[in-house]
Image (cartoon, rainbow, N blue to C red):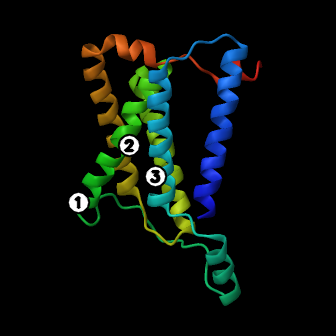
Amino acid sequence: MFFKYFSITLITLINLFFKIYSKKKNIKICWQHYFFGYLFIIYLFIALSEVVGFPSLYRLQKNLNSGQAVFNPGINLIPFSDGLEISAILNIIFFMPFGFLLPTLWRKYRRLFPTILQGFILSFIIEMSQLFTHRATDITDLIMNTIGALLGWLLFSLLSKFFFKLCEKTAIEFSIIKFINI
């Protein structure tokens, strides 16, 4: 519950900050970018809250007080050790929006490698965080999530040929380095 309220507050503050920044720097951002940006934020929120399943502070305290482990070191490093299960296909489907929305929002992800790299990094973070939520950490999930990001990027590449104008209006050039004036 805390994570949900914290996330909503953080999203609102970040959005307000970027709106003030873009207005101050006279950067025009179209409504389509905000629309896809909100879809991306909702997607990330679902990924972190439902897939990772952050435990509540109450649950962590209860585990610590009862002597239960907070860390679950179970990691499967053998790809496809259980064969190709439905969960592998679901992981691909789950990461396709990530691979699709990154290039929709930011031009630097219109190239394949940066999108796949970000998909891999997000998947790796999710898999490592599952060590602390008593969920399975599996190399197959990492592979399938990265494939999902790849397929999402391919879908974007295909659709952008038909919806070029929308894609050009939606994506922006943004770098955190430019943002903080380094």
Q: Which mark, by number, is residue 125?
A: none
Q: Which mark, by number, is residue 146?
A: 2
**Considering only vertical position in the picture, is 13 above or below 155?**
below
Residue visible at 65% across and 47% down?
9
Left or right relative to 24: residue 146:
left
**Considering only vertical position in the picture, is 78 above or below 22?**
below
Under mark 2, the amino acid is Thr
Q: Categorize mark 2 by other alpha carbons within 10 Å: few (<14), some (14-19), many (20+).
A: many
- x and y, in percent, of residue 134 in the image: 50, 72
Q: Which mark, by number, is residue 86?
A: 1
Q: Quadrant of the C terminus?
A: top right
Q: Quadrant of residue 73?
A: bottom right
Under mark 3, the amino acid is Ile
CA distance for labels 2 and 1: 16 Å
Front-most of residues 36 and 112 = 36
Q: Categorize mark 3 by other alpha carbons within 10 Å: few (<14), some (14-19), many (20+).
A: some
Pointer 1 or 3: first along the chain? 3
- x and y, in percent, of residue 138 in the image: 41, 61
Residue visible at 61% across and 70% down?
56
Pointer 2 or 1: first along the chain? 1
What kind of element bears circle 1?
helix
What kind of element bears circle 2?
helix
Q: Which residue corresponds to mark 3?
A: 46
Q: Quadrant of residue 97?
A: top left
- x and y, in percent, of residue 47 in the image: 46, 52
